Image (cartoon, rainbow, N blue to C red):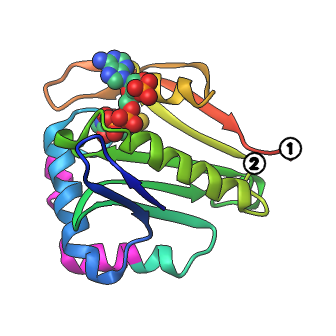
Amino acid sequence: MRHFLPNGKQLVIRPPQVTDAQACLHTFQAVTGETDFLLFTHEESLQYDLAKEEAFIRAYMDNPNNMFLVADVEGDIAGMVSLNQGRTRKQHHMALLGIAVLHRYWNMGIGRRLLTSAIRWAEAHPRIAIIHFEVLANNERAIQLYRNFNFTEHGRIPQGIIQPDGSTVDLVVMSKRIKPI
Ligand SMILES: CC(C)(COP(=O)(O)OP(=O)(O)OC[C@H]1O[C@@H](n2cnc3c(N)ncnc32)[C@H](O)[C@@H]1OP(=O)(O)O)[C@@H](O)C(=O)NCCC(=O)NCCS
């Protein structure tokens, strides 16, 4: 999927190749250092190396029930989105969403386009009917993005996150029905 950003640069949303592993790893480790809104700490992300990232990308290539897409801005991996199908048969209709964009690319519509691509993939999948995730209650930007796509908030898990500084944050449970079950 090819788009133009407000700054005129070209954005392509595409699955990564194994040769993108270094760039993907760099972006993943950068976003965990830029924001506390992800489930990984920066230190945890540093435990990933090139071999692990290559294996991570290959696992998506080999599994038609999971999806991993990158936002490629003229060779720079500006963000990524993933959907992972529920592991057990009883949850094969559920897919867990993960999404992140590098801070310098925020507010250019990349998150919206990544989410659109993920929803389209889920619509085309034969079994996935629900996209779900938990988002930190103070992540207003992400929650607004999800509301724009008619994701529903179902409640919250009090103190579902303990940040590295010891502070706690509630988790908001959200989902979107993609198709009838
Ligand atoms: C959430 C995230 C993916 C959004 O990416 P993005 O590329 O900036 O998103 P877009 O530019 O497509 O859209 C941003 C939307 O955020 C909302 N937004 C922007 N600024 C906002 C603000 N100050 N307060 C509330 N909402 C805001 C708007 O709804 C905007 O969409 P709209 O302008 O079309 O209405 C990005 O901020 C990010 O990676 N954050 C860190 C990681 C993260 O939080 N991931 C989600 C974990 S659940």
Picture coordinates of residue 1, whole percent (x, y): 48, 62
Q: Which residue in the protein does label 2 denote?
A: 129
Residue at coordinates 52% horizontally, 29% vertically from top-left? 146
Q: Amino acid at mark 1?
A: Pro
Residue closer to the observer: 20 or 136? 20
Q: Residue at x 34, y 57 (%)?
A: 11
Query: Percent x, y for residue 43?
Result: 13, 50
Question: Does residue 52 show up magenta in the picture?
Answer: yes
Q: Which residues are magenta?
A: 42-57
Residue under circle 1? 180
Give yes or no for contact between labels 1 and 2 (Cβ–Cβ under 8 Å).
yes
Report the side of 65 relative to 73 (left or right).
right
Q: CA distance from mark 1 to mark 2?
A: 6 Å
For the point 74% across and 53% down, the residue is 93
* Main SS, magenta residues: helix
Q: Position of residue 139 (x, y in %)?
A: 35, 23
Could you tell me the amino acid type at mark 2? Ala
Query: Residue 26 occupies which quadrant of the picture?
Result: bottom left
